[in-house]
Image (cartoon, grey):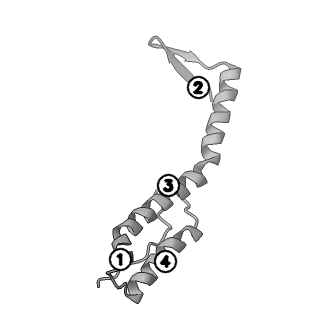
Amino acid sequence: MARYRNVNGTKVQLTAEEETARDAEEKAWADEAPNRRMAELRSQRDALLVETDYMGNSDVTMSAKWKTYRQALRDITSQTPTDDKLSNITFPTKPKE
């Protein structure tokens, strides 16, 4: 399938060299997807951990449920995201107390 680019409002077919370069760019993007997904997973995990960091203060006693929750957040990166929406990742449930 031929690909095109826009040159001053005119549709111009890519050259063989441009096609090869574009294929390489698309392959590199696809190959990097797992790293982008893990970065997003870490970002979401870090945000959830930040919400509970105050519990690490010396004047707060952290319950076992909160310790378990925080550990589960730290361990979440052992799961491997299969899509950009992280739909297969199971985040732990935040304790109510």
Horizontal and vertical percent position of residue 28 = 65, 41
Q: Residue at x 36, y 79 (%)?
A: 58
Q: Earlier in the sequence, mark 3 or mark 4?
A: 4
For the residues bearing labels 3 and 4, Cβ distance under 8 angstroms:
no
Pick the residue in front: 47 or 14: 47
Which is closer to the viewer, label 2 or label 4? 4
Give the alpha-carbon distance from disc 1 to disc 4, as whole Å.
Answer: 16 Å
Q: Earlier in the sequence, mark 1 or mark 2?
A: 2
Q: Earlier in the sequence, mark 1 or mark 3?
A: 1
- Circle 4 — which element? helix
Amino acid type, residue under disc 1 in the picture: Met
Residue at numbered disc 3 = 84
Q: Quadrant of the C terminus?
A: bottom left
Residue at numbered disc 2 = 3
Q: Residue at x 55, y 67 (%)?
A: 77
Pick the residue in front: 57 or 91: 57
Residue at numbered disc 4 = 72
Q: Quadrant of the N terminus?
A: top right
